[in-house]
Image (cartoon, rainbow, N blue to C red):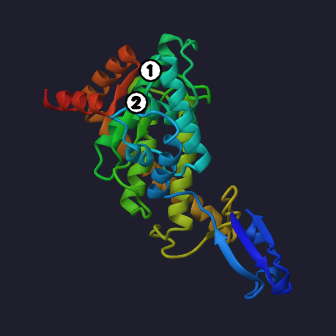
């Protein structure tokens, strides 16, 4: 959002300040934005790590916190969150503590609140048949295992197969170790491979894939297309801008700057990236099948696994 302050043309003695705000600066008349038209333009973006931590402290001042609470960890886990999201997380954490009859909000309440805001509340009353439940468990462990077996992936924070109100039947939560503003080609490829790990696990164990990978495929395709069209990470096209981002402050939709013939070549490049990442995920899981089976069986029993439990199970499986 941009705040456009103090339009010129008024008598300075009148004491009039004109404020304007928009989240569509790209559609404004260029004459309106020419130098001298506005005295100040303020861009309000989503908060960074320090900003999120500061916002959390402001809202957390209204509630009683336990001694184990580390707001920096919460800030790390909430990249891309707005101020309203963060306020909602503190409020949700307080509600969770009250429901359990505790006077202070603990770290686990806030981490659960992050999940509630991102994925919705748990729906333990949703009953899946044994085959679906087993497939979801292998799918999520596939994500986590592929992520853990790569050098450029984020650490696993939690794996769950408890359905949520926003439609997910389970998910794997990764938490970055630090705030990042740039990503290398190898890091993007590692993320795409991790996203396709769930599909790879389904193929390896069940011999077919399910509709559960739909969101993973969408995200992986978007990353691969960005590599080709915007980041200059394609050997075929090199440093050539093929798409540009429009509506930056709304949907971030990309607009093509290429011909139909080039579009077909872009699709081929995206397909090659996705196919290679899928093959890498398949190979990683095939060579670590024992760990995949062991951790999936444990997840089916417990329904939730922390990152520490996951790494311990992985180490035990690989050292056996």
Residue under the image location 42 percent in, 49 percent down: 191
Question: On the rendered structure, is 193 left or right of 309?
Answer: right
Estimate the x, y position of residue 219 in percent, counting from the top left. 55, 47
Residue under the image location 78 percent in, 69 percent down: 19
Q: Quadrant of the N terminus?
A: bottom right
Whether residue 118 is visible to the viewer of this picture, yes or no, is no
Residue under the image location 61 percent in, 71 percent down: 242
Estimate the x, y position of residue 197 in percent, counting from the top left. 41, 38
Residue closest to the far left:
320
Residue sitting nearer the eye, 37 or 283: 37
Question: On the rendered structure, is 52 left or right of 294?
Answer: right
Residue sitting nearer the eye, 165 or 171: 165
Q: Circles 2 and 1: CB distance less than 8 Å?
A: yes
Estimate the x, y position of residue 42 in percent, counting from the top left. 65, 71
Q: Using the image, determine if residue 52 lies above or below residue 259.
A: above
Residue under the image location 38 percent in, 57 percent down: 187
Estimate the x, y position of residue 312 in percent, counting from the top left. 22, 30
Residue tagged by mark 1?
A: 102
Q: Quadrant of the C terminus?
A: top left
Q: Using the image, determine if residue 38 lies above or below residue 191.
A: below
Residue tagged by mark 2?
A: 106
Question: On the rendered structure, is 33 left or right of 42?
Answer: right
Residue 233, disc? none
Local secondary structure at mark 1: loop
Whether residue 228 is visible to the viewer of this picture, yes or no, is yes
Measured Cα–Cα span from mark 2 to mark 1: 9 Å
Question: For mark 1, does the 10 Å Cα neighbourhood hold few (<14), some (14 to 19), or many (20 or more) residues?
Answer: few
Residue sitting nearer the eye, 66 or 269: 66
């Amino acid at each position: 959002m941009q705040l456009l302050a103090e339009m010129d043309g008024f008598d300075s003695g009148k004491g009039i300040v004109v404020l304007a705000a928009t989240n569509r600066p790209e559609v404004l008349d260029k004459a309106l934005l020419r130098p001298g038209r506005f005295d100040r333009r303020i861009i309000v973006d989503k908060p960074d790590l320090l900003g999120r931590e500061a916002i959390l402290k402001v809202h957390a001042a209204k509630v009683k916190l336990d001694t184990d609470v580390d707001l920096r960890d919460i800030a790390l886990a909430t990249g891309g969150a707005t101020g309203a999201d963060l306020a909602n997380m503190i409020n949700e954490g307080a509600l969770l503590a009250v429901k359990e009859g505790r006077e202070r909000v603990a770290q686990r309440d806030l981490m659960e609140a992050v999940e509630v805001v991102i994925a919705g509340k748990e729906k333990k009353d949703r009953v899946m048949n044994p085959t679906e439940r087993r497939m979801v468990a292998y799918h999520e462990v596939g994500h986590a295992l592929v992520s853990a077996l790569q050098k450029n992936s984020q650490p696993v924070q939690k794996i769950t197969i408890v359905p949520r109100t926003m439609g997910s039947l389970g998910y794997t939560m990764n938490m970055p170790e630090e705030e990042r503003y740039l990503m290398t080609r190898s890091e993007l490829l590692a993320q795409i491979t991790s996203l396709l790990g769930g599909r790879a696990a389904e193929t390896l164990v069940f011999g077919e894939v399910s509709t559960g990978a739909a969101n993973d495929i969408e995200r992986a395709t978007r990353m691969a297309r960005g590599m080709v069209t915007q980041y200059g990470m394609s050997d075929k096209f090199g440093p050539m801008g093929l798409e540009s981002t429009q509506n930056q402050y709304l949907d971030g939709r990309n607009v093509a700057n290429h011909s139909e013939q080039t579009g077909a070549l872009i699709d081929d490049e995206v397909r090659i990236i996705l196919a290679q990442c899928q093959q890498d995920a398949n190979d990683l899981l095939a060579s670590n099948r024992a760990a995949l089976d062991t951790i999936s069986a444990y997840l089916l029993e417990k329904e939730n696994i922390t990152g520490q439990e996951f790494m311990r199970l992985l180490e035990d499986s690989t050292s056996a």
